Image: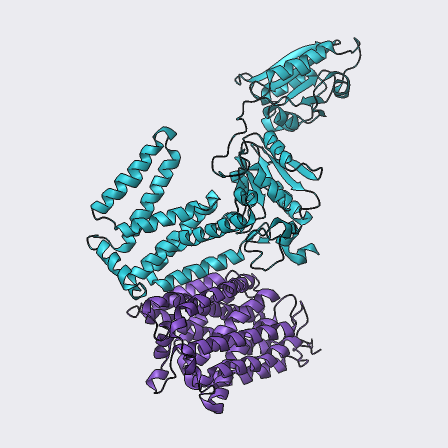
Chain colours: A purple, B cyan
């Protein structure tokens, strides 16, 4: 089985997963940007655009000729991202109702579900995301409708809460995740014009910024270290701040669905890139390896925080490397610039 | 040396009538087969023999169009009589042809046609004399509509083709007949509108039909399973309809209909999830009503799949998501129930399937009794005995209603199995499990294809389409975007 994806579903998956990634990175994994998170999301989306542009320039339509080094870097980046997403899914599940369940039993179902979905190949993963993109506004509207009375617009001030430094660091961290999700440009089929991918990134960043603004209106700015903890932030997100508990249902569905689509796209990308880095390997085996790797890395992804800060720079360098006319040992050009 | 049955069947007809008759008697086991008939007669000094199966062929047609025509035929004595002469000058049947291969003649004879074997001629004349008893065209049983045509397909392929042609009165309607199966052959008909259906689609369906290598194909149910893209999928990838108007509407839209002998319905390919939500009423009603009914059916599908699983997840794992008053009612209703909610749900679900299945098999005369026993006595008694809570009866009843809103029976059954999967996931992991199950189902649907067409088109992938697929828009807004949208622009090129 060859893992592949067409341009249209790839863009849908990119859009859905980047929005989720930016929100997750800025509101839960790195909440130090405080009220400036919305601006960090926009900056991160913008920072991911050069990577997408370089990747798009480094390939010919229907004939991807990217260097294995670039692919390997992107593969590692999305594998880490998948681990982060999987950790977030299992933590959320544990927090919401299954706190007495062993982590393995939280991890196993999501790993199996990801294996099943990614095993259906890239188009299915991408089209699932495009269906999600259509359902998402309805669920969001429902959430906002139910929350309307509890939203506090004044809580979004000061607009650049964390200050320039915090906003920049948060953006850089989130940009790494967003840029790694553009990895499909290295092998996707069909119309791979960078402008379209850049457009998808822009939409995703705008949606993420909007979601962050809504979230800021639901929950007051954290004032002490405890309120910056992951679980506290998740609690604030899922319980919708101060609304009645029974209004959580659509929010929970929204949260899980967004995370699952992010995870599936991460795992698909890492499996597809692995298949291109290691020729003649079966796609199903790649999917299994990608999901297993994500599950195994879940345990240590907390300790990889320093790596996440530099992920964007590494990806940008790898994408630029892809433009160089690198030669393989046989002397054939394996990456060409235009 | 004695020849085997296959050797006899694969031979060409001999010029000797006696030899041919012996061969056909052997092939039809005439010594034991009481309905295999061999009627010898003479015409202008030449010996002939009509071979047919009693009951399958119409005696009156044979007497009138074969025996009487030959007796009255204006052929001079001593003239050489061959198949061409019989067809052109003697036989009065509209449909007859010359055939020299024993196997083909035999197949025609067992399907109700009559073969006239001629002495001194290596060809037989095969005439259309089918006259077996068949059901008259009547009302549909499973796809009832409030307004619109009421007639349904019957078991006769010829009648079904006529019904289809009556709705699509166009010279461009092609009805291509094929036989499928290797041992017991089944006649199928591929119907499409030339110029509207994609050539690629027609070729693909035809080639899939021809590739069927099953020994016997028992009607369209078997054909469906043998040609669909993914036999492991829970949802059918071809549409079954017993309504000629619906099949005709699909053909006009550029899809292909498959009809078969002994199958009182048609298969339509390719279809999408949204075609499964259509009913004939939609086309006959005003667009607002049709759109509303489609939304109701979509809601029915969602309820049918998720309601019991969600109820289980919420009451077992996320009680805080229920408003306090509702939670109080549920707790009160369940106070005396000794089983966990999962067991309670499974008892009710399987009781519902049992009542459903029994209701389908039970003789009509006692059908109402089953309703009383199933719904009133069992339900009431179960609640009184505190085996199940009343709220669960409401949940299962709404779920059942949601399932019945789905027009396609097979699709509804597939959703029942999906529902059990959601219940299992909900009972193990709560809402987390329900979300995982929904995610798996969505990915499966996105990967599914119907004769190469994406099952979720025109939503995923998004494609320009006639605004009568998701919701109905006013007729004047419906463009003539026909079947090609199913395959996307790339295929059109």
Q: Can residue B346 be seen in this view?
A: no
User: Horizontal and vertical percent for residue B379?
Assistant: 27, 43
Q: Where is residue A28 in the image (x, y as percent from the top left)?
A: 41, 79
Taking B8 as reference, is B231 left or right?
A: left
A245 to B450, vertically: above or below: below
Question: Measuring 64% from the left and 70% from the top, which residue is drawn there?
Answer: A192
> Where's residue B281, x and y in %?
53, 42
Work out whether residue A320 or residue B331 is closer to the camera in this orientation and state it: B331
The N terminus of chain B - image quarter: top right
* Residue B254 in view of the camera: yes
Name the quadrant of the C terminus of chain B. Answer: bottom right
* Number of residue marks: 0
Q: Is residue A199 above or below residue B37?
A: below
Q: Nearer the viewer, residue B208 or B146?
A: B146
Residue at image point 33% right, 47% down: B349
Name the spot of residue B400 as percent of width and height, x first: 38, 47
Q: Which of B130 and A41 is in front in this view?
A: A41
Q: In the image, is residue B462 above or below residue B483?
A: below
Nearest the eye: B78 or B285: B285
Specify whether A295 is left or right of B19: left
Q: Quadrant of residue B307?
A: bottom left
């Amino acid at each position: 089985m060859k893992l592949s994806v067409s341009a249209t579903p790839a863009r849908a998956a990119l859009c859905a997963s980047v929005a989720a990634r930016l929100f997750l990175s800025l509101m839960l994994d790195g909440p130090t940007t405080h009220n400036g998170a919305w601006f960090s999301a926009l900056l991160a989306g913008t920072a991911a655009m050069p990577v997408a542009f370089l990747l798009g320039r480094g390939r010919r339509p229907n004939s991807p000729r990217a260097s294995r080094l670039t692919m390997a870097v992107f593969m590692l980046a999305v594998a880490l991202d998948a681990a982060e997403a999987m950790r977030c899914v299992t933590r959320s599940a544990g927090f919401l109702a299954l706190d007495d369940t062993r982590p393995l039993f939280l991890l196993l179902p999501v790993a199996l579900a990801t294996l099943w979905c990614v095993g259906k190949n890239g188009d299915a993963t991408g089209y699932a995301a495009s269906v999600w993109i259509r359902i998402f506004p309805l669920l969001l509207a429902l959430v906002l409708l139910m929350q309307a009375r509890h939203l506090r617009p004044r809580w979004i001030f000061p607009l650049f809460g964390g200050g320039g430094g915090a906003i920049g660091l948060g953006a850089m961290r989130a940009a790494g995740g967003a840029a790694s999700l553009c990895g499909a440009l290295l092998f996707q089929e069909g119309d791979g014009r960078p402008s379209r991918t850049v457009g998808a990134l822009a939409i995703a960043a705008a949606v993420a910024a909007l979601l962050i603004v809504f979230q800021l209106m639901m929950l007051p700015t954290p004032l002490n270290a405890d309120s910056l903890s992951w679980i506290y932030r998740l609690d604030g997100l899922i319980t919708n701040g101060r609304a009645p508990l029974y209004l959580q249902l659509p929010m929970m569905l929204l949260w899980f669905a967004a995370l699952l689509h992010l995870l599936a796209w991460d795992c698909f990308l890492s499996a597809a890139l692995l298949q291109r880095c290691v020729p003649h390997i079966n796609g199903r085996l790649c999917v299994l390896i990608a999901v297993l790797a994500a599950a195994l890395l879940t345990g240590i992804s907390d300790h990889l925080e320093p790596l996440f800060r530099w992920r964007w720079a590494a990806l940008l360098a790898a994408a630029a490397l892809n433009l160089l006319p690198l030669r393989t040992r046989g002397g054939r050009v394996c990456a060409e610039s235009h | 040396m004695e020849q085997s049955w296959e050797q006899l069947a694969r031979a060409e007809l001999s010029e000797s009538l006696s030899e041919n008759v012996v061969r056909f008697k052997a092939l039809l086991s005439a010594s034991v087969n009481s309905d295999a008939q061999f009627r010898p007669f003479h015409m202008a000094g030449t010996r002939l023999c009509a071979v047919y199966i009693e009951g399958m062929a119409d005696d009156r047609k044979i007497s009138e169009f074969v025996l009487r025509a030959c007796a009255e035929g204006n052929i001079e004595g001593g003239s050489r009589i061959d198949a061409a002469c019989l067809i052109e000058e003697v036989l009065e049947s509209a449909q007859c042809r010359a055939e020299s291969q024993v196997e083909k003649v035999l197949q025609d004879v067992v399907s109700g046609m009559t073969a006239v074997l001629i002495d001194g001629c290596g060809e037989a004349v095969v005439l259309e004399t089918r006259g077996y008893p068949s059901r008259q065209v009547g009302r549909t049983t499973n796809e009832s509509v409030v307004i619109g045509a009421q007639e349904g397909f019957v078991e006769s392929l010829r009648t079904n083709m006529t019904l289809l042609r009556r709705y699509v009165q166009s010279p461009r309607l092609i009805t291509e007949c094929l036989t499928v199966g290797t041992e017991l052959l089944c006649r199928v008909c591929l119907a499409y509108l030339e110029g509207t259906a994609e050539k690629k689609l027609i070729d693909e369906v035809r080639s899939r039909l021809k590739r069927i290598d099953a020994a016997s194909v028992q009607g369209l149910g078997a054909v469906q399973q043998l040609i669909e893209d993914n036999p492991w999928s829970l949802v059918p990838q071809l549409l079954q309809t017993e309504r000629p108007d619906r099949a005709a509407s699909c053909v006009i839209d550029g899809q292909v209909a498959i009809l078969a002998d002994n199958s009182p319905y048609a298969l339509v390919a390719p279809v999408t999830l949204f075609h499964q939500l259509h009913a004939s009423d939609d086309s006959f009603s005003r667009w607002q009503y049709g759109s509303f009914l489609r939304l109701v059916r979509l809601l029915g599908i969602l309820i049918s799949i998720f309601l019991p699983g969600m109820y289980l997840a919420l009451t077992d794992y996320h009680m805080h998501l229920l408003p306090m008053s509702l939670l109080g009612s549920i707790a009160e209703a369940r106070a005396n129930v000794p089983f966990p909610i999962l067991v309670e749900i499974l008892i009710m679900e399987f009781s519902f399937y049992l009542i459903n299945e029994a209701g389908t098999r039970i003789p009509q005369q006692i059908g109402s009794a089953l309703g009383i026993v199933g719904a009133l006595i069992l339900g009431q008694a179960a609640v009184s005995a505190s085996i199940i809570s009343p709220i669960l009866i409401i949940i299962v009843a709404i779920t059942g209603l949601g399932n019945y809103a789905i027009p396609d029976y097979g699709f509804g059954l597939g959703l029942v199995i999906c529902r059990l999967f959601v219940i299992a996931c909900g009972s193990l992991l709560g809402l987390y499990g329900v979300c995982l199950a929904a995610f798996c189902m969505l990915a499966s649907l996105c990967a599914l294809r119907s004769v190469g067409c994406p099952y979720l088109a025109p939503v995923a992938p998004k494609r320009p389409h006639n605004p009568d697929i998701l919701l109905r828009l006013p007729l004047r807004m419906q463009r003539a975007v026909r079947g090609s949208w199913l395959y996307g622009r790339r295929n059109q090129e």
